[in-house]
Amino acid sequence: MQNLVYFLYGKTYINITNACTNSCAFCLRNDKDDVKGAYMWLKNKNVGAEDVIKQIEEKKADIKDEIVFCGYGEPLVKYNEVIEVAKYIKKNMPNIKIRINTNGHGNYIAKRNIVPDLAHVIDSISISLNAQNEKIYNDISKPSFSGAYNVMLDFAAECIKNNIDTTLSIVSGYKADLYPVDIKACEKIATEMGAKFRAREWIQNGY
């Protein structure tokens, strides 16, 4: 069985795709295949909303408080499926909060503004800011297309505009000599936009 729904420290996560528009230097999937024993690589790339919903139903008894779209890939590569699953959760598990952890490339992927659609079905979003400027962002995130940094910032601005609880995040403590991420400068970017900010410490051995 593919691990589309998995658990980490009591929280529920959805691993809907392995595709990503970034290839971040610090990404855990570069070094390991699992999260707490849950194998994260998907054999079937054509995961549908119904597949995720089936696993949610199977594991429903263990789901508490919040479901997070976050796995070994960028969830908004499957934005239609994410929206469909989120609608299901809102209808059938109304007390469960929904969050998306994303690199902020959703509008680029969809070739349209999907934020208003997300705003109807999610409670919060965490966007990987990763760096205080485009050069360091490109060095550490290794995006597959040019202009990705500004695409991410524009996406974040749209989330704030649409009243989604928005957090910009960075990973701290990862090879600072190669990737000089300025935490204070990143926090300033987030707060000036009207977003929350989170510096997440790099976990060398993963989860």
Image: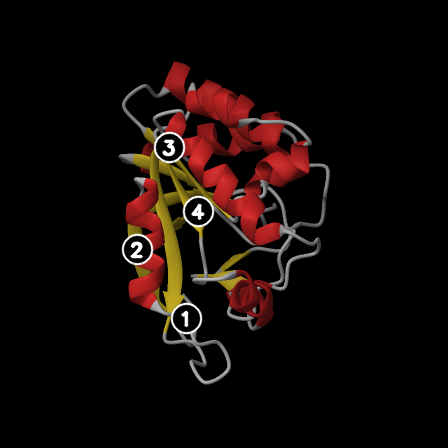
Image x and y of residue 74, in percent: 58, 47
Label located before the other in sequence (3 or 1): 3
Tag 1 and tag 2, C-beta contact below 8 Å: no
Label located before the other in sequence (4 or 2): 4
Q: Amino acid at mark 1?
A: Val
**Mark identifier at residue 188:** 2
Q: Amino acid at mark 2?
A: Lys
Badge 1 marks a residue whose secondary structure is loop
Residue at the (31%, 61%) spot, across then down = 199
135 lies above or below 189: below
Which residue, given by chain and number where applicable, does mark 3 sit on?
160
Which residue, given by chain and number where applicable, does mark 4 sit on?
127
Q: What crowding class fits label 3: few (fewer than 14 Cα within 10 Å), some (14-19), or many (20 or more)? A: some
Tag 3 and tag 2, C-beta contact below 8 Å: no
Q: CA distance from mark 1 to mark 4?
A: 16 Å
Image x and y of residue 192, in percent: 30, 46
Label located before the other in sequence (3 or 2): 3
199 lies above or below 11: below
Q: What crowding class fits label 4: few (fewer than 14 Cα within 10 Å), some (14-19), or many (20 or more)? A: many
